[in-house]
Amino acid sequence: MNITFIFLASSLLFLIGVFGSLFFGSVTKIIISLQCILTAAVINFLGFAQILYGTSVWAVTFVLISVILIFLFQFMIVFYLNSNTYQYQSDGFDFSSGLYYFGIKDWLGE
Amino acid sequence: MDLIKSINTFMNPFGSITILLGTILVFLFFANSQTKRIKIFSFIFSMLAFVSSFVINIIGFLNNGVYSDNLFTSGLVQIIEISYILIISIILLIIIFVFNGESEFYLKLNIIFLFSSASLIFFTISRNFIVFFASLVFFLISLFALATLMNESGLFALKSQNDSRKSAIANIYNISANNIVRFFLAVVFSLLFIFFAISLLYGVFDFKNFIQLAEGIGTYKDNLGFVFSILALALYLYYGFFPFQSPYIRVTTGSSGVFSYLMWLFYFLPGLIFTSRFALIIYNVKEDYKTILVFSLALITIVSAIGSGLAVLKSKNLRKILSNLILLIFTGNILNLLLYIVDYVNEDGYRMLNYSGLSLMIISWLPLAVIFTLIENNTGSNDINGLRSILIKNKAVSAGFIISCISLIGIPAFAGFTHKNYYMSIIPKAFAGGLSNLTPLLSWAVIVSVAIYLGFFIAGIIRIIISGFTGKVDIYNDKAIFSKPALAFIYCFIFLIFVFGILYLIGLFGINLFGLNFSSLNLF
């Protein structure tokens, strides 16, 4: 296992995550894509810590705290969505246009 | 005596945070109370907590000076930034109490708001990446909690409605909930960019904090280009500049009015603090990457200014106009960074420019936003065409509207003049050889960025003034209700616009008044 392989693998995961977050309209798919970015960063941290520095206390602490907090944030978002979607809306878990909407209506319209 | 000494040492920088967290601890004992007296008590208590935090923040620094350890650092810059955070927190606390004081969630809102302010102060004094990232996530989580609590009123309205009415309310409520979810997913997206960039930083060298990064950037500059591109992208996404503004615009136009104020005044502060940290680091490699830095920053400024400026010019939605004006004000921070990179301003000047943007938002933009909210409450719609029919009903409100607009344009003797004066002076100075350290192409990039930024900002405000005078007059809407606290709020800020505007002019001309020299007063 060398450092180039770790960097390429994490970069690939990062790109998949970015593409998925921007392309998909479903909240579930967006969250899975966000997990890909998170995993890419975790692979970087642990890989670099193991190969380059030998000791990994700081990296592991950072990874633990950050991952717990980001998971908490995502859990809160999903919990809010699940607990409050009212029966009249059937497509509550899908955004019509992905995470960002590049239409002119949102920009210049009402 | 030793105890007093140890408390005195602790006051900087943790005194402010301790007071806010202590207040939360007190409120936890009656968080579910619905009594009106308790709500009023909690408002007054929180206000006192913020004021005492403000005082302790300054006194602690005066007594103990600069503080630094492995996790935190606190100097004059952090003290000023914390002061701004606390002033904005006090304003937001008043807004939350005025609009949500009767809500059954008020005490919970108060507790979460105190927590978000404490997180933001932690973020400001953070030095290590662990504290930096954790406090940022805590701040955003508390902002999410505030957004969802403020949106709850829609859900409770459903309980007492018949089926057809329920359906209509549920749809509006669901749209609002979707906007909140979309916005905070976009925030998580930008957060993960920051997380990924920090992981790469750790791989380039054992960078664990900003000071190490500032010192090591000269040595490792060849490997840091990709990392800094990711960080810049993260910041761009966090700010939500054009064309990524849609989640921010939707959440401010489609959710509770009070949450819009939280978004406008509070959400961008970590972005500003992060940009200024980032600026001091990339300044160290400006000579090596001047062309790419100047072109990138100029491009960001131009794209964002045109995107937000056109939205202010074309949109009829009042909240959308206010949201885009805020984006324009914070685009100014990128422009400030550009001016800092090309050595037009030094480090102190760069910070002053950032603070003058924040002051513009607090003193000149805020009364305009309150007037727009009053119009929204009176007409029941967000349409700018309803502006005139409300303005002609109350002369004081229309005077406030014009004064805050003039201040935003940057006419001398009004508070907003300080913000525009720096930018206005760059164009003649550039032609007189003020940017001689740049190639002609880079000089033109800077001049065009400043001109486009100023042009769209001023054109947007002029458009708002024209709409205020030429809109439709609704003859059926005879009664316009302006609550006394809202009017007092507007008068207070109009007074501040004049006071700071005149003080700045006195300082600019070097006039000594009552033995006081105001020439160093460039903050406003």
Image (spheres, rainbow, N blue to C red):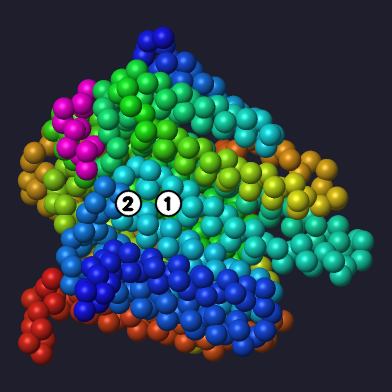
Q: Position of residue B458 (x, y in %)?
A: 36, 60
Residue B216 drawn in magenta: yes
Q: Position of residue A88 (x, y in %)?
A: 85, 50
Which range is magenta? Answer: B211-222
Quarter in which the N terminus of chain B is drawn: bottom left
Residue B160, by quadrant, is bottom right
**Amino acid identity at mark 2:** Ser
Q: Earlier in the sequence, mark 1 or mark 2?
A: 2
Chain to which mark 2 belongs: B
Q: Residue at x 48, y 61 (%)?
A: B116
- Pointer 2: what residue? B126
**Amino acid identity at mark 1:** Ser
- Pointer 1: what residue? B135
Question: Is the residue under label 2 in contact with that under label 1 (CB below 8 Å)?
Answer: yes
Q: Position of residue B45 (x, y in %)?
A: 48, 81
- Helix, strand or loop for disc 2: loop
Above or below — where is B505 with respect to B323?
A: below
Q: Residue at x 7, y 41 (%)?
A: B436
Q: Residue at x 20, y 26 (%)?
A: B220
Of residues B233 and B465, the one nearer the viewer is B233
> In screen coordinates, is B522 left or right of B313?
left
Residue B140 drawn in magenta: no
